[in-house]
Amino acid sequence: MPIVSVITPVFNASRWLPEMLASVASQTFTDWEHILVDDCSSDDSASLIEKAAATDPRIRLIRLMSNRGPAQSRNVAIEHSRGRFLAFLDADDLWLPQKLRRCLTFIERNECSFAYHAFRYLSADGRYTGALVKGPSPLTLKTLHTRRGLGDCMSIVIDRDKVPCFRFPDHQERSHEDWLAWLWLVKHDHIGYLLPEDLGRYRLSETSRNAKKLSAARKVWHLYRVTEGLSWPQAAAWWLQYSWNSLRLHLRSRPREHAAGFSSSVSPGTAIRGAKDIQDVA
């Protein structure tokens, strides 16, 4: 039985898959399975995964018959997983080679339910990285509502011995499903801490613009007031802190041209070398 189950939802991600798969293959901790759920892609994502699985039996492909979104895709993978630890990696993000080994050591040393690590934002073309992003520690109800910097799913590793029933909420609209999952962890008294080491790359969307930031801010307000049912004063106070911290994070950590990164068109072997080289990039 593998110790770690790596979970990846896939939808029209053929552009990113070779690098992402290479970053998992480059892990210094090798006792893992990688479950990829293809959510009815119209490109050649599934065939790329099948080719990778043909050369590495640790890779498993599940194909959905209808488009179900990232939350349900992850839950399908979790249902088929066998590892004690769950690690999440979206198709366009990347890990550095020590990610799994360092996270497992950190969780066992600190006896926590889950851990999340520092990371850098990566430009959409894979050429530039930003300043190191460190999330809050520990993760509490307040810090989840007011801070950013968890790296969404890319940085989280969960110990299922302590959280045996973990699932992503799939009854909500298809947005913020990761935030709602971390909210579930916090509300069920599961403790998570930051591993302050640079272990991943979160790729920014090419279509991220101010309009989308405003839309995200509105959705966060809806989460606070409607989903969470916070009072107007508390929702306003936490939303203002969220907005300010998000702006600061964007200005400080956005990818810049002086930093090297991954090339979006390199072969898997080159991506592995890039993952090793990028660890010391400021």
Image: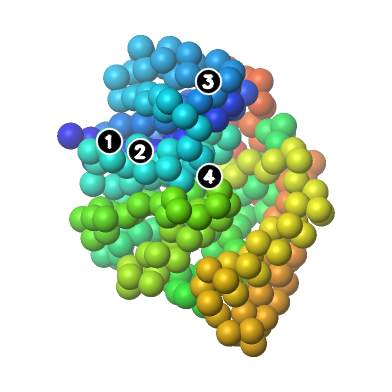
Residue under the image location 32 percent in, 42 percent down: 78
Residue 191 drawn at (x, y percent): 35, 69
| Mark sitting earlier along the chain (3/4) | 3
Residue 256 drawn at (x, y percent): 77, 46
Q: Which residue is mark 3?
A: 45
Question: Mark 2 packing: few (<14 Cα in 10 Å), some, or many (20+)?
Answer: some
In this image, 197 relative to 148: left or right? left
Residue under the image location 45 percent in, 53 percent down: 171
Residue under the image location 51 percent in, 40 percent down: 69
Residue 80 - label: 1
Q: Is residue 193 visible?
A: no
| Mark sitting earlier along the chain (4/2) | 2
Q: Could you give the CA–CA distance between mark 2 and mark 3, rounded to whole angstroms?
A: 18 Å
Instruction: State yes or no: discs 2 and 3 in contact (Cβ < 8 Å).
Output: no
Residue under the image location 42 percent in, 42 percent down: 72
Q: Which residue is mark 2?
A: 76
Q: Could you give the CA–CA distance between mark 1 and mark 2, rounded to whole angstroms?
A: 7 Å
Instruction: State yes or no: discs 1 and 2 in contact (Cβ < 8 Å).
Output: yes
| Mark sitting earlier along the chain (4/1) | 1
Q: Could you give the CA–CA distance between mark 3 and mark 4, rounded to whole angstroms?
A: 22 Å
Front-most of residues 150 and 174? 174
Question: Mark 3 packing: few (<14 Cα in 10 Å), some, or many (20+)?
Answer: many
| Mark sitting earlier along the chain (3/1) | 3
Residue 211 - label: none
Instruction: State yes or no: discs 4 and 2 in contact (Cβ < 8 Å).
Output: no
Mark 2 or 3: the one toward you = 2
Q: Which residue is mark 4?
A: 200
| Mark sitting earlier along the chain (2/3) | 3
Mark 4 or 2: the one toward you = 2
